[in-house]
Amino acid sequence: MLRKLSAQAGTLLIGAIALVFVIGAVTALDLGTSRRMGPGAFPLIAGGILVILSAVALVEDMKAGAEHLKIDWRTVVPIALAVAGFALVTPRFGVLPGAGVCVLIASYAVGALSPLRRAGLVIGAVLGVWLVFIVGLRLPLEAFRGV
């Protein structure tokens, strides 16, 4: 049983981090109302979904007897750097440049993409962030800092 759980360390870690976000959202942030969501609504919803998905994945993998997989550092490193890039760029330049940097760095985890496809991915993601969060949800985010 312990060997099976160690094979699911990533799933357990994601579930634990998501649970921290859920607890933080409920205890420290305003959730708002269903018509006007507060700053805690998104972490609560996203964290809750991740907790549920982690639990389902853990149960399914335990049933199937999933084996421990070797970590592919060529995918882990770009994703970690993408999150760090978003965290560093967004406060200084705004959410859209932060999203662009994040997607650009994360795209290197996919493998060989042509520069044109990589640029299309970044532009599409930035456009999606703008449409969903700024236009659609009307969140008070600075698209570009200083503009």
Image (cartoon, grey):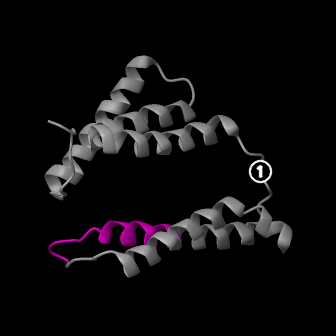
Above/below status of 12 relative to 113: below
Residue 19: x and y in percent read 52, 73
The residue located at (34%, 27%) in the rendering is 120
The residue located at (61%, 38%) in the rendering is 77
Viewport quadrant of the C terminus: top left
Residue 23 visible, this angle: yes
Q: Pointer 1: what residue?
A: 69
Residue 45: x and y in percent read 37, 71
Q: Would you say 56 lies left or right of 143 here?
A: right
Q: Quadrant of residue 8?
A: bottom right
Residue 54: x and y in percent read 57, 68
Q: Is residue 46 magenta?
A: yes
Report the front residue among 38 and 63: 38
Above/below status of 8 relative to 90: below
Q: Is residue 43 magenta?
A: yes
Report the front residue among 6 and 61: 6
